[in-house]
Image (tube, rainbow, N blue to C red):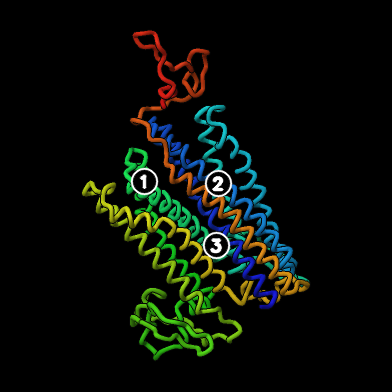
Amino acid sequence: MDPITLSRIQFGFTISFHIVFPALTIGLASYLAVLEGLWLRTGRKVYLDLYQFWIKVFAVAFGMGVVSGLVMAYQFGTNWSNFSRFAGGVTGPLLAYEVLTAFFLEAGFLGVMLFGRERVGPALHFVSTLAVALGTLVSATWILASNSWMHTPQGHEIIDGRVVPVDWLRVIFNPSFPYRLTHTVVASYIATALMVAGAAAWHLLRGNDNTRIRTMLSMAMWMLLAATPIQAFIGDQHGLNTLQYQPAKLAAIEGHWEHGAEGEGVPLILFGLPDMAAETTRYAVEIPRAGSLLLTHSWDGRIPALKDFAPADRPNATIVFWTFRLMVGLGLLMIALSAWGLWLRRGQRLFSQRGFLRFALALSPAGLVAILAGWYTTEIGRQPWIVHGLMRTADAASPQHSATQVGFTLALFVVVYCVVFGAGTAYGLRLITKGPASDEGDLPVQGGPGEPRHPMRPLSAATEGVDAHGDTAAPEHRHGH
């Protein structure tokens, strides 16, 4: 393999690890904010117990996301120096804005969120949780603004062989940015909901049935019921945007090589094997005109075919054809899971139907797999461009590296990542399998001045009761536990 291919594999490998953890932190941060808000509003201890349980998983995911992101960012300078030299005037400031806004916001309030529950009032702690949740969304906004500009660049001029931004609003709010941002954020919420639902299903299948586990499953299923249809709609709109701005990518996704007769529409190829050398999709299973209906919203609409583009300008249809179908197929299973959950909820069997619980457990990693499949579709489908229409990937790599050097660092990354992030993932799964606290009841947990968690007077924190014999209450009954 040549250095460019190895550099692409290395970047793809590192970002595959990195993208999983920010997706979980985006979803978990918002989930934690909802849980704490519900606790403050209702006083039900079940929400606080779930908060204290999932914040541990959030901390693990956040830490691994930061580490993997730092490593990934260095590759822009080491392996892709020509790209940094060409497009750094746009991508550099956007990444700097992410650090100055989102990262500082998260770092400033993360410590309070993780360790300050008994040191600050409930209101301030809730503000900290909201700030961290907002920080994850702001971070996604800047990162996706940079990535979207690489797909649909605008608001710049090329001066002396370098990109110079001339209109930052057009750079940030480029044509594909709204679709990528909403698609990614909703995908993060869906992936988190599936993980929470899978964790609850695992405990219910093992007989660990209590209010906390049931609340986890119920909240996750409501989120899936709301988010999966929205995601399908966003994906449809994103497809229309891709048809307008990156038609070669869409043709590769559909395995569509040549135009049929006028007026016969475009078939939808459900399955097949695109052959880049033979310029055809072998063993295609088609639905007549369904491609026109989905892609153009008309009965006889037409889309560009791969043969409309020079061979050097075509993405690898063999890969993106299947990564896209993997993403869509998993999405349909998620919609089916949410619909099944709604039907069981009406029959009071949501927490006891073992087939449903097994299905939820099996789909627990599906959200993350779908995110990776969608990311591969997006990025591989952009090839051979690193900045669409402006710079080819072959021209973006650092010229001084040999295949041996890049191959060695790639092998080193594989070993280190599998050890470090494998251990982190195993630890996170171990936390999930322990489950939340399962003490009795949903007694209100108080907080604020004069209450046990933030005492105003010396004796106001003393919750031990005295029985008829003068003995204090057992330690396990203190502080509402």
Q: Amino acid at mark 1?
A: His
Task: Tell me where residue 414 appears, x and y as whole percent.
Answer: 62, 63
| Residue shown at 42% from the left, 14% from the top | 472
Q: Quadrant of residue 208?
A: top left
Q: Is residue 163 visible?
A: no
Horizontally, residue 52 falls left or right of residue 146, namely: left
Q: Amino acid at mark 2?
A: Val
| Residue shown at 70% from the left, 63% from the top | 76
Pair 1/2: label in front: 1
Please identify the quadrant where the N terminus is shown. bottom right
Q: Which residue is mark 1?
A: 203
Label number found at residue 177: 3
Q: Around disc 2, counting alpha carbons within 10 Å, would you say few (fewer than 14), some (14 to 19), or many (20 or more)?
A: some
469 up-or-down from 454: above or below:
above
Task: Tell me where residue 237 appears, x and y as whole percent.
Answer: 44, 66
Q: Which residue is mark 2?
A: 60
Q: Mark 1 or mark 3: name the one nearer the start of the chain.
A: 3
Q: What's the CA distance linking mark 1 and mark 3?
A: 39 Å
Q: What's the CA distance linking mark 1 and mark 2?
A: 21 Å
Q: What's the CA distance linking mark 3 and mark 2?
A: 29 Å
Q: Quadrant of residue 466?
A: top left
Residue at disc 2, secondary structure: helix
